[in-house]
Image (cartoon, rainbow, N blue to C red):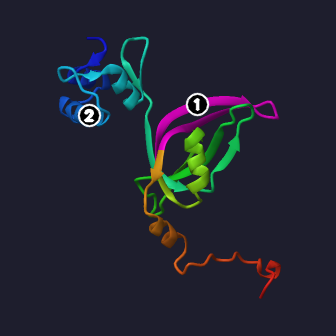
Amino acid sequence: MKNFITVQEIARELDITITTAYKLCSELKSELRRLGCRTVQGRLPRKFFEEKMGLNLSKRGGFTVNKVILMGRLTRDPEVRYSTGANAMAVSRYTLAVDRKFKRDGDTSADFISCVSFGKTAEFAEKYFRQGIKITISGRIQTGSYTNKEGQKIYTTEVVVEEQEFAESKKSNLSAASTDGFMNIPDGLDEELPFS
C-alpha cells in the first residue's frame, strides 16, 4: 500500500518515538475525519501526511522536513506590493521579532526573521497586521541569492508563510501599544502640529 503510511513508517522516517508518531497520527486522523475522509486499516494517506507535515520524498527514499512555526511581534507594518500582469497577486514582506529562550546578562534578546506571504495571505497581512502585534505563523524556510548594485552576491533566508494568525486578542494589542488610548508624540514634533 504505497499510497498509505503506517505509524511505524512515520516513526522511522521522522526519527521519532512510536508514542510521538501515534499522537501525530491521532491528530491527523481527526483532521481527516473533519474533512470527511477516513483512514484505511489505521494508515494515513501518504500524500495527505506529506502535505500536512511539509514533507518531500528525497532521492534516497526518506523524508526531508521543511516546516517552521514561529510566534513573535511585527517590527513594522507589512510592506505589500502587487505583481504586474493580468493576474496581479499581493506579496507581503514583514519581519518578526522572536524572543530567545535564554537571556544573556539579564537582557532579553530576539531573532529578527524575514517573512514573505503571497495572495490572500498577503492581503490579510496588509489589512490587519500592524507594528507591535503578536502573531503566529507556519510555513517553510526558503533560501536564495541576488547580485546587488555593487556586483556582490547577497544570500537571503526567509520564511514563506503558509498560515498566519493573531497570537493575542485585539484588546491585548491595544493595551500593549498604549495605556491611555492616546499615541505618544515623538520629541521635536510640537512645532509641526497645526494646533497647540
- Residue pictured at 77% horizontal, 34% vertical: 148
Q: Mark 1 points at which residue?
A: 143
Q: Is residue 191 left or right of residue 110?
A: right
Task: Note whether 194 is above or below 87 in the view shown.
Answer: below
Q: Which of marks 1 and 2 is nearer the N terminus?
A: 2
Where is residue 153 drawn, in percent x and y?
Answer: 72, 29
- Residue pictured at 57% horizontal, 38% vertical: 158
* Quadrant housing the C terminus: bottom right
Q: Name the residue under label 2.
A: 33
Q: Which amino acid does the dot numbered 1 rest on?
A: Thr
Residue 118 in sight here: no
Q: Which amino acid does the dot numbered 2 rest on?
A: Arg
Where is residue 19 drawn, in percent x and y?
Answer: 18, 33
Q: What stretch is highlighted in magenta?
A: 137-163
Task: Note whether 141 is above or below 170 in the view shown.
Answer: above
Q: Residue furthest bottom?
A: 196
- Of the two numbered discs 1 and 2 in the rendering, the one whose residue sits closer to the viewer: 2
- Residue pictured at 32% horizontal, 20% vertical: 46
